[in-house]
Image (spheres, rainbow, N blue to C red):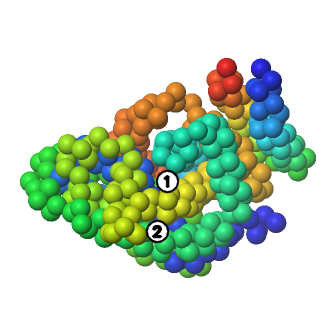
Amino acid sequence: MQMVQNKARVGGKELTAAMTLLVASHTFLIYPQYASRYGLEASWMAPIEGAIVSLVLFLLLDALIFRFFPGQDLIEIAQTALGTFGGVLVALLLALYFLFVTASVLREFVENVLTTVLPSTPILVATLLFMMAVGYFAYLGLEGIVRTAFFTLPILLVGVLGLCLLTMNWWHPILLFPILGSGIPALTLLGLRTCSLFTNVLLLSIIYKHAHDPHELRRVGINSTLLAALVLSAFLLTYHMVFAEQSAVNISFPFYQLARLIYIGRFIQRMESIFVFLWVAAALIVMAVLIWGAAYVLSVGLRWSTFRPGVPALTLLCLAVGLIPASVTHAIQFDYRVFLPWGWTMNFVFPILVVLVARMRTPGRAHRRRRVA
Amino acid sequence: MLKFIISILFIPLPVFIYTLSFARWMHGRGQRVGAYSAGVLAVVTAVFAVVVLYRLSF
């Protein structure tokens, strides 16, 4: 049983799809508004800039792992070098990070749904029903999640790119000027903050062992990062060609607002209901993979026999944390003040630091393992 | 008050019992670290859920 649950085997393409969804789902959340506020007309450049920085850091992490600790994930590296206590500490930090990100995505997603399509539904009912689906999905394990992501990703890509193209009659390319928006320093800072979205790197350093070929880590990381950056950038480009900068920074739900504008003729208009489906599917997969990640790191770090019994408790904890903010404004403040400015430290600095500290503490063992490999 | 009690019975209580039984199962297999951590997770989750449900009910 333990073997089946903790040693799931997934293909590189499926893993790429799940990791792409994890980052590209920010199209539906608060990120477009955030990027518009700090990047103005040039906000579409921020995902590309963030992706380039993320790729450099990811390749560094990939090289460090395969050079010094081949075949080991981040928790095992911490356990090898820092002992059981170090492993527990790293596992707890990662699980907390995944939980807070999931809770933040949950609250933003539920507020979006309640405000736009279910205005009379109590927040607890909507959140509870959604989290039951997420919990069940996470309980099924990594294989179920990534295979569903593999089917969902093409639909999402067609949906987002379709949304961009269907609003073509509202495009005003002149709104993209001045081309550098808020200026190079502000744009550079926004690009670095955009690295916080690339949680795929952190998650990959934990789950790459589950790929049929662990050496696919590099390809999965590069493909998912580039594809997600492309989706985010295409959406922001369209968004800024449709809305002027003054309006763009004040729209709460950019994706929904853009979908509402579609008017190709009398029979092709108001297509937001189709996009709500995309919205739900993407949010479901993203939250399931993050809760699975939290349960998995706890199971490895705390030496649980299996991760599955931890999933209901983590799902409920996530629901409770997501409902703590008194209003949507407070929930968004978490993203504005904590996740977007500082998330990159957990995505990149933390795993690189763990590997470097582990390398310094176990030079002999690492060399031996490298020779054996 | 009734809403609060019913919501506790249907949401955090089953999860608490399930996670605690997982902790007991691991304790029975001699996995002390796992058992204690699962127990702590069960308690923390229950406390958070009850507090949030209380806020939403009143």
Residue at point 47%, 75% (across, down): A154
Out of A90 and A257, give the one closest to the viewer: A257
Quadrant for residue A110, please give it: top right
In this view, the mark in front (2 or 1) = 2
> What kind of residue is marked 2?
Leu
**Residue A61 in the figure: left or right of residue A207:** left
Residue plotted at (49% across, 42% down): A115
Label 2 – label 1 distance at C-alpha: 39 Å
- Give the residue at the far left of this rendering: A178
Residue receiving disc 1? A358
Helix, strand or loop status at disc 2: helix
Q: Quadrant of the C terminus of chain A?
A: bottom right
On the image, the x and y values in percent for residue A262 come to 34, 62
Mark 2 or mark 1, earlier in chain: 2
How many tags in the picture? 2
Residue A3 visible, this orientation? yes
Query: Which mark, residue A56?
Result: none
Q: Which residue is mark 2?
A: A156
Q: Quadrant of residue A226?
A: bottom left
- Quadrant containing the N terminus of chain A in the rendered view: bottom right
Residue A238 is left or right of residue A75, and the answer is: left
